[in-house]
Amino acid sequence: MEPRIQALLGAMTLDEKIGQLGLAMSGEGEVPDGLGEAVVQGRIGSVLNEVHVETVNELQRLAVEESRLGIPLLNGRDVVHGFETIFPIPLGLAATWNPDLVETSARTAAVEAAAAGVNWSYAPMLDLGRDPRWGRIAETFGEDPFLIGALGAATVRGFQSEDPGPSPGQALAAPDAIAACAKHFAGYGASEGGRDYNTTNVPEHELRNVHLPPFKAALDAGATSLMASFSDLNGVPATANRWLLTTILRDEWGSDALTVSDWNSVPELCTHGLAADHSEAAYEAATAGLDLEMASTTYADHLRALVESGRIAEERIDAAVANVLRVKLRLGLFENPYTDPGAFPAPANPDHLGAARTAATQSAVLLKNDGPTLPLAADRLSRLAVIGPLADDGYEQLGTWVFDGNPEHSRTPLGTLRARFGETMEIRYVRALETTRSRGRGGFGDAIEAAKQADVVLLFLGEESILSGEAHCRADISLPGAQEALVEAVAAVGKPVVVVVMAGRPLTLEPVLSAVDALLFAWHPGTMAGPALVDLLFGDVSPSGKLPVTFPRRVGQIPIYYGHKNTGRPPTPETVTHIDNIEPRAVQTSLGNTSFYLDAGATPLFRFGFGLSYAAFEYANIEVSPHEVAPGDTLTVRAEVTNVGDCEAEEVVQLYVRDLVGSVTRPVRELKGFQRLGLQPGERTTVVFQLHTDDLAFYDRQMQCVTEPGTFHVWIGGDSATELRAAFEVVERS
């Protein structure tokens, strides 16, 4: 334990120690009655959701200058995908497959948040998103643990420091650094039925091989804190799950990261049925290894009595307090607790807006482009119809978790189109639907008339921001309201139709795909949605986003994800049929049957890693060297990539592997590397990946992390269904 922490613990009373383990709401602009006194008395060590810098500085003054020990405060906030300048939602950022850009987005958010006195962000969210019904899939980095880990680590680096320092977690003293909090530890993305706060049952193999690696990656990048999940995990809520908070985090990983509850989740142990009352809830959480309680006061109300009765050793309290103090030391709060907003750049400045524009551009995924219809040629268009409820709404384009986002900074698609082309073409706008949920068709007539007069129709559809995020789960993930009917009505006019979808989750788009000529999936792109989307639609930039999550054809296919197990009877093109094609008197037998749906097949609508471009890329000549490696060795995988299109474009090259035989069954493919590269028309390059045998390790039947000998397949290509394959062997070291 650091000497300064040891000295502080030696000087603290039990009440002052317990005070460091509470996280209280501030007054959002003023110091509420009682909070200031509690800070002075050492009964509150951290606050949340205070973004008025004058109030933050006053609270810090009370803590540092008037409390007995002068311990500064943590001030936490959900800084999820930007602060005032809003970047694409995390699922959209994941579609960039660009860790450097994700790091820049977090750095930008940290600078803006730090200027308001925030020093702790409740992000990144590292839960796997494999159920698009779940509202919080919008906050995830997708369905794949490798991608989530890479982007989560980038977020940590962006929040905490541009320079990670000599060792993890040691370089947070810069005034614009804020502490990262990896959440929700762990398994929250597996909530039954895609319903928030619901039960999760995840086998230990799956936890270790799939759900936990992103958190380990974030900790390795220096994350200073972890937030426990709300959810019940295999019968023990994560808030009081000793296996997670102590066995894994402390004993196996050796982490000293601060652990914090989610909002009110300690007393909710009673609602779960794990604890009979709040005293028992405090006991269960504290002894499991939860350091800091958010919002509720069970620790403040009951820890003293639990220590005095001998049920909880004071050493456990000391360990929790040490973890809190360590974050404050690493942030440099003891030396500089106050915030001078004049020392920071103005929010939403040109650099910040430029970064948001780049992120929005790279996040959009082109899913269909018949003709091709896109890019549009401005010099060939005289009349443009812009239709839909999301074409000119500066708030809805921001997405979920935008407490501090300023819609006045938003640049909408319609506004950008008018600013760029208003003098050279007629742009007619029809909202058609009041909201994305509206079912009335009163605006359809104007939309149809606008389409008839136009050369091209741009439809801006999707979900309002309120339809995704925490507690915003959907059982039906089709386009809500009358939007499908609007597409059908406009498409019937016969003009080229381009649909831009803004949404917080994958949607079941099969009903509208056949009716439109092109479809660009933009997630919720953030402040700079308009310039980014217009750049893409008119070919200033080629789309380069790739799906970080699988799109189902129908909701009944969920869960559907690329890294599934093979089963004993995997689906094949020869055996997959459709219910409409089955003979009336077909023999009912299991012979030849495989794992698929009679009415939806076995394939998704769009696969993980998929995304079209205005260029085209060919992959060839995959090579592996050496062909045999022993544990501890590294092999090289390379392939040639050629831009065979007629425009400059960026491609996300993806590396997948498969362990053909294991002591525990392995996925059919696993992402193990990716690179974003730009190529001119006709340009060819060789892309090279280094693959260490540790990258092939998994937890076996004895829960040991091992790389087993055997044959592996390796693919390089533009999505998870790429066919360019080679093989190599892992052999026992002689």
Image (cartoon, rainbow, N blue to C red):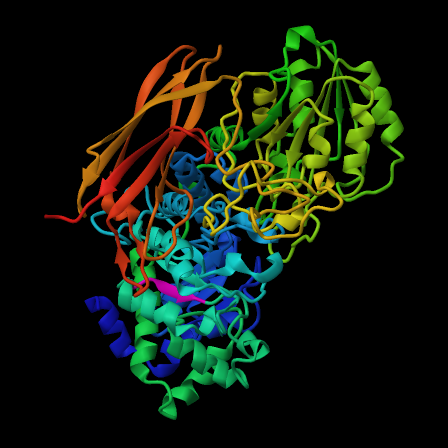
Is 665 in front, or is 422? 665
Is 224 in front, or is 602? 602
Is 624 in front, or is 595? 595
Report the predominant secondary structure element of the magenta stretch. Answer: strand
Magenta residue check for 700:
no
Q: Is residue 291 left or right of residue 438?
A: left
Q: Is residue 73 above or below residue 40?
A: above
Q: Is residue 476 left or right of residue 259?
A: right
Q: Is residue 101 above or below residue 382?
A: below
Residue 130 coordinates in the image, percent (x, y): 53, 50
Q: Is residue 227 above or below residue 521?
A: below
- Is residue 50 something that shows in the picture? yes
Report which quarter residue 191 is drawn in. Answer: bottom right
> Residue at the top extreme?
379
Magenta residue check for 257:
yes
> Residue at the bottom extreme?
309
Q: Is residue 284 left or right of residue 626?
A: right
Residue 8 coordinates in the image, percent (x, y): 27, 72
- Is residue 391 something that shows in the picture? no
At x 78%, y 15%, the residue is 454
Q: Is residue 459 above or below residue 89?
A: above
Report which quarter residue 212 is drawn in. Answer: bottom left
Range shown magenta? 256-260
Residue 681 coordinates in the image, percent (x, y): 43, 11
Residue 447 coordinates in the image, percent (x, y): 83, 26
Quadrant including the N terminus: bottom left
Q: How many marks?
A: 0
Q: Is residue 539 left or right of residue 310?
A: right
